[in-house]
């Protein structure tokens, strides 16, 4: 995950967490990054001061083993490679700020409302759409790191999103 200081066209500054710089660019181009103050989708990265660590911090606890995660009942379509490791409401060992969590929940709701869930067939369906073999539309589902890398190498743009719990439950 990468942290950016952001600024909307009205001059409001706020911060955001993204999978990587390409993820931010894709979300911003799609108008899915919104100002937390005014809701504007005209958002750009602002200058940031470098993070300078003053003292050594204790190591973060290890994430739970994959076996424990597999035992948890699935309440939503699984997205193992798109969610932060461990608790999806925590990032980099700390809780996700409330404003960021709310934005991610709105993003999830918009994706679920506007796109088709294709599950583990995501990579195959993305290729079909890119090759004109399937109807052009928004899709979401699961892809392994290797599948996502292969899609990128083929020039197929995708974005990985942190999949947080729904706002309504």
Image (cartoon, rainbow, N blue to C red):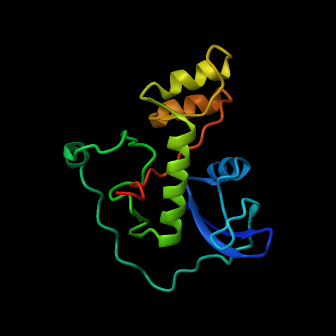
Q: Residue furthest right?
A: 9
Residue sitting at 38 percent across and 68 percent down? 93
Q: Quarter holding the C terminus?
A: bottom left
**Which residue is at the front of the view, 55 or 151?**
151
**Which residue is at the front of the view, 147 or 14?**
14
12 left or right, relative to 88: right
Residue sitting at 67 percent across and 65 percent down? 39
Residue sitting at 23 percent across and 42 percent down? 70
The picture places residue 66, in percent across and down from the top left corner, at: 26, 45
Relative height, residue 24 to residue 57 (above, below): above
Relative height, residue 56 to residue 150 (above, below): below
6 left or right, relative to 57: right
115 left or right, relative to 136: left
Query: For the image shown, how many numbered marks are present on the structure?
Result: 0
Residue sitting at 42 percent across and 80 percent down? 56
Q: Residue furthest bottom?
A: 54
The picture places residue 152, in percent across and down from the top left corner, at: 62, 33
Relative height, residue 51 to residue 44 (above, below): below
The picture places residue 53, in percent across and down from the top left corner, at: 52, 81
The picture places residue 26, in percent across and down from the top left corner, at: 68, 47
């Amino acid at each position: 995950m990468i942290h950016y200081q952001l600024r909307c066209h009205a001059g409001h500054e706020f911060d955001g967490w993204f999978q990587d710089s390409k993820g931010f660019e894709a979300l911003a181009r799609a108008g899915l990054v919104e100002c937390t103050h005014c809701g504007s989708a005209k958002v750009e990265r602002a200058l940031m001061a470098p993070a300078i660590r003053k003292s050594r911090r204790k190591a973060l606890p290890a994430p739970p083993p994959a076996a424990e995660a597999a035992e948890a009942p699935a309440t939503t379509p699984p997205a193992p490679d798109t969610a932060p490791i461990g608790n999806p409401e925590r990032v980099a060992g700390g809780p996700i700020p409330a404003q960021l969590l709310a934005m991610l929940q709105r993003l999830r709701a918009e994706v679920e409302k506007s796109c088709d869930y294709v599950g583990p067939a995501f990579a195959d369906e993305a290729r079909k759409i890119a090759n004109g073999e399937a109807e052009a539309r928004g899709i979401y589902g699961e892809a392994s790191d290797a599948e996502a890398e292969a899609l990128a190498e083929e020039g197929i743009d995708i974005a990985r999103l942190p999949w947080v719990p729904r706002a309504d439950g």
